[in-house]
Image (tube, helix red, strand yellow):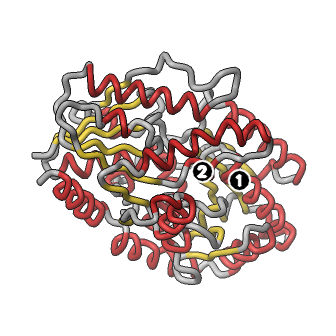
Amino acid sequence: MARVVFLHPDLGIGGAERLVVDAAVALKSRGCGVQIWTAHYDPTHCFSETLDPDLPVVCVGDWLPTSVCGYLHALCAYLRMIYVALYLVFFSGVEYDVIFCDQVSVCIPVLRLSRRRKKVLFYCHFPDQLLTQRKSALTKLYRAPIDWLEERTTGMADMILVNSQFTAGVFRETFLSLGSVQTDVLYPSLNTLTFDRPPAEAQGLGGLLPEGTTTLFLSLNRYERKKNLGLALDALAALTNRLPSGQRAGIHLVVAGGYDDRVAENVQHYSELKELAARLGVEHCVTFLRSPSDEIKVALLRGSAAVLYTPSREHFGIVPVEAMYCCCPVIAVNSGGPLESVEDGETGFLCEPNADDFSQAMNRLVREPHLRGHMGQAGRRRVQDKFSLQAFSDQLHGYILRLTP
């Protein structure tokens, strides 16, 4: 039985965390011993699976800063993960065969310091250096050694997996010195247990939406500027201008997503979006939700005419897969991961990232409601065929076996 330890920087409720939790659950179901180690874990802000005592979560190093006066986030993340790795290797006494780490690769050389060298599997969601804007010479100078470390330490892993063909291409373009390194694609899966539970009356949408709502659209993403959530509000405003007043009254948008009071950008962007809705004159038909429960999220997906997925060049994005499994069409930007998950015209629409294109797609679903059922069923079949937990589990377990002869 392989013993696998997962190392992850912050075990919150984002897409990367969803993958780590699903991977741990998948390997546990195959008989592997599994632990998750992290620098931050809050039982009140986590995925429900991590509350299972049979899936141990170990949190060390949370006393270390996440930033210095609002700056140096990347450096602090590196130091926190180095601390977690050092604690695991030298002080924990934990026996393991494989380390599965993601997001922060700088801990890999630390893991090699173990007396009996263990195998390291690194999962690349997206090169970290591409997630930071370089607007000043000072930022470029600060990031230069961090970027160099990211590339060098990523190449030290025994196996590298990526989340999509799109990310595989970006990986090769970004890490030029790793051109000869093999990267395999392991698509994120969907743990359907949460979505298959019968809806509880208390967790329906009663009281959440205004009376008279006939068509619900949903934006589901973290409150981060790079997710381009403002596009959903712009599209809603454009849609209401297209529709006659009789149809316009029943349109409603829910903007829901991960929110953490510790993250300044979450707090700021939440306020920015509410101000944008007011400027566009659509605040009366928008509901903002912060970190909704799994039950509320599933109820929203089941009750929506479409999910509006607004990030551009998203490396994969689990939200479209969740929506399709719930028989909800997806309107997404035609770049990045959605090109591999969404079938344009079959399970949803792939659009240019502008309000006009998005509103046209929304308008079709309003005027042709039969499309929702057709696209919803096609989407569910696509998830079952391509993104099932069984397929993910089989593939991941195969990689672990290759690392533990």
Residue drawn where x is 60% and y is 66% of the image: 306
* Residue 350 location (% of width, % of height): 63, 75
Residue labelled with disc 1: 229
Q: Position of residue 349 (x, y in %)?
A: 62, 76
Q: Examine the rendered structure and indicate whether residue 168 appears above or below residue 286.
A: below
Q: Position of residue 92 (x, y in %)?
A: 24, 22
Within-10-Å neighbours for mark 2: few <14, some 14–19, many 20+: many
- As drawn, the residue found furthest toward the front would be 177
* Point 15% across, 51% down: residue: 404
Can you give x and y, in whole percent of width and height, for residue 170 in the image? 55, 64
Side (left or right) of 243 relative to 19: right
Name the image quarter holding residue 54.
top left
2 or 1: tag closer to the N-terminus: 2
Can residue 257 be seen here? The reply is: yes
The amino acid type of the residue labelled 1 equals Leu
Q: Residue at x 58, y 45 (%)?
A: 147
Residue situated furthest top in the rendering: 63
381 w.r.t. 13: above or below: below
Answer yes or no: do the residues labelled 2 and 1 have beta carbons within 8 Å?
yes
Query: Taking the image as drawn, is residue 183 in sight?
Result: no
276 and 367: which is toward the camera: 276
Q: Which residue is mark 2?
A: 221
Please report the residue visible at 46 percent of the width from the left and 21 percent of the height from the top.
62
The local secondary structure at tag 1 comes to loop
In the figure, is residue 234 to the left or right of 204? right
